Image (cartoon, rainbow, N blue to C red):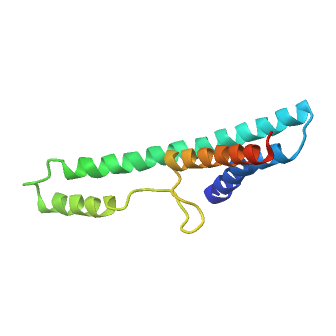
Amino acid sequence: MALVIAASNFTAVMFGGVVITFKQFYSIDFVKVVAFEMVSMVHLFLYAWPADYMAQLSHQISESVLHGQWLGKSPKMQRSVLIMMERANDPVIIKVDGLLPALNLETFGVGLSTSFSYIATLLAIFGE
């Protein structure tokens, strides 16, 4: 589900400017396209923000386990801490290998900057 929504919103945000540069709009149509772009950006942000927060919490948990007071404790507790350390080596990241990069705020920013680059390039080429 995250793949479909993130991919569709990335596509909408990145290529929405192409529609704006190639077609002459009436003012109401332009407002509709801009509103669609804004909703797509907000929707993508609402997926990227919690995913980024989850990755940060995963990193904080691994740091807390590492720096905790577990030396000199019972062997059962040390085994439990060791298991937690092994699991903390792989941060919790939402991604689909080959299709969707790690969903976080950095990816959101890259998508927005790519979108604005496409729009600026098309506007420069067509001289509008």
Residue positioned most to the right: 26
**Looking at the rendering, which quadrant does residue 79 occupy?**
bottom left
Q: Residue at x 18, y 57 (%)?
A: 77
Q: How many marks?
A: 0
Q: Is residue 83 left or right of residue 118?
A: left
Q: Nearer the viewer, residue 51 or 30?
A: 30
**Looking at the rendering, which quadrant does residue 113 occupy?**
top right
Q: Residue at x 45, y 43 (%)?
A: 53
The quadrant of the rendering that contains the N terminus is bottom right
Q: Nearer the viewer, residue 51 or 78?
A: 51
Residue positioned most to the bottom: 98
Q: Residue at x 76, y 48 (%)?
A: 125
Q: Nearer the viewer, residue 55 or 14?
A: 14
Q: Nearer the viewer, residue 120 or 64?
A: 120
Residue 7 image position (x, y, % from top left)? 66, 56
Residue positioned most to the left: 72
Residue 27 image position (x, y, % from top left)? 89, 30
Residue 81 image position (x, y, % from top left)? 22, 58
Q: Residue at x 31, y 48 (%)?
A: 61
Q: Is residue 112 left or right of residue 23?
A: left
Q: Is residue 23 left or right of residue 72?
A: right
The quadrant of the rendering that contains the C terminus is top right
Residue 124 image position (x, y, % from top left)? 73, 44
